[in-house]
Image (cartoon, rainbow, N blue to C red):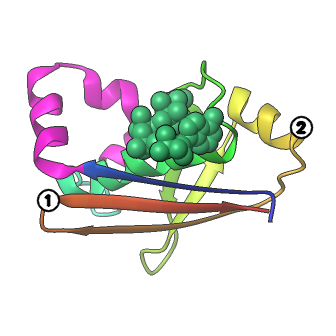
Amino acid sequence: MAGIGIDVAAISRFGTALERNPGLAERLFTPDELRGPSGARRATASLAARFAAKEAVAKCLGAPGGLRWHDVEVRTAPGGRPVLRVRGTAAALAAGLGITSWQLSLTHDADVASAVVVAS
Ligand SMILES: CC(C)(COP(=O)(O)OP(=O)(O)OC[C@H]1O[C@@H](n2cnc3c(N)ncnc32)[C@H](O)[C@@H]1OP(=O)(O)O)[C@@H](O)C(=O)NCCC(=O)NCCS
């Protein structure tokens, strides 16, 4: 294992931030993240978990600062499993740390969304 990261987000507070800041959702998330496989906008809980996933990846990389939100993308594999796609500065940092693969788990319940990331 080359790194591990964890993060939580308060779903209601995250939803309020998205409502009050036009364009924030598009700054944080790629079009594929914003819309699920059905094409409908994802629930706030799922978006909060994806935000936590990006923060968890940043922790795996040592929270270097300057990461671009779209450079860490949560894709959805057939069957619904979330998978990470890392590009740009984040990918360059990962390569420098010898990271070649990422594992991600998401959860959301009540008002909490959380992500755990393992880099190897
Ligand atoms: C440093 C940072 C990770 C702290 O996260 P936070 O959401 O403010 O706070 P959290 O409660 O989730 O995490 C705090 C814990 O992070 C850990 N942490 C601090 N610096 C860290 C680092 N450089 N690397 C990994 N973990 C770190 C610590 O254990 C800390 O707890 P402690 O102070 O009790 O020891 C955060 O400020 C940060 O830089 N995030 C990255 C932002 C970013 O690049 N986003 C784009 C992602 S694509």
Which image quadrant is residue 91 in? top right
Label 1, label 2: how far apart the Cα atoms are: 36 Å
Q: Position of residue 55 (x, y in %)?
A: 49, 42
> Mark 2 is on which residue type?
Gly
| Residue with the mark numbered 1 | 111
Q: Nearer the viewer, residue 60 or 38?
A: 60
- Element under label 2? helix
* Left or right: 3 as drawn, with respect to 16: right
Q: Position of residue 42 (x, y in %)?
A: 23, 54
| Residue with the mark numbered 2 | 96
- Element under label 1? loop
Q: Quadrant of the N terminus?
A: bottom right
Q: Position of residue 7 (x, y in %)?
A: 43, 52
Which image quadrant is residue 104 in? bottom right
* Left or right: 90 as drawn, with respect to 68: right
Q: Is residue 5 above or below residue 54?
A: below
Is 33 part of what is drawn in magenta? yes
Is 17 part of what is drawn in magenta? yes
Which range of residues does the magenta coloring cover? 10-35
Q: Quadrant of the C terminus?
A: bottom right
CB atoms of marks 1 and 2 within 8 Å: no
> Mark 1 is on which residue type?
Asp
